Image: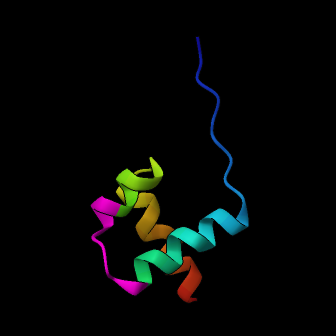
Amino acid sequence: MKRERRKFSADFKAKVALEAIKERSTVLQISSKFKISPAQVTKWKHEFLE
């Protein structure tokens, strides 16, 4: 049985990216809070800064 890929809204991605940019929490803490991978947090942060 395949697992369906999760789809994230632009608002959610921006919220995560902004939290990562503030650097009040580590990437691991942010990823745990939002239940996503640390690599995804980093990717969205870089995309947001472009």
Q: Quadrant of residue 41?
A: bottom left
22, 42: nearer the viewer: 22
Measured from the top left, where is residue 14 in percent x and y? 61, 73
- Write down the region rendered in magenta: 22-29
Q: In this view, does 3 lie above or below 47?
A: above
Residue drawn where x is 59% and y is 18% of the image: 2
* Residue 34 x, y percent position in the rendering: 47, 53
For this orientation, the residue located farthest to the bottom is 50
- Quarter of the image holding residue 15? bottom right
Residue occupying image coordinates x 33% and y 82%: 23
Residue 33, given in percent of the width and then of the height, sits at 40, 54
Q: Is residue 17 shown above or below 9?
A: below
The percent position of residue 12, horizontal first and vertical second, equals: 64, 63
Q: Does the magenta stretch include residue 16?
A: no
Tally of numbered discs: 0
Compared to residue 23, the image places residue 16 above or below, namely above
Q: Where's the C terminus, which quadrant?
A: bottom right
Residue at the spot 31% in from the left edge and 80% down from the top edge:
24
Would residue 24 appear left or right of 4 to someone viewing this image? left
State left or right for residue 32 relative to residue 17. left
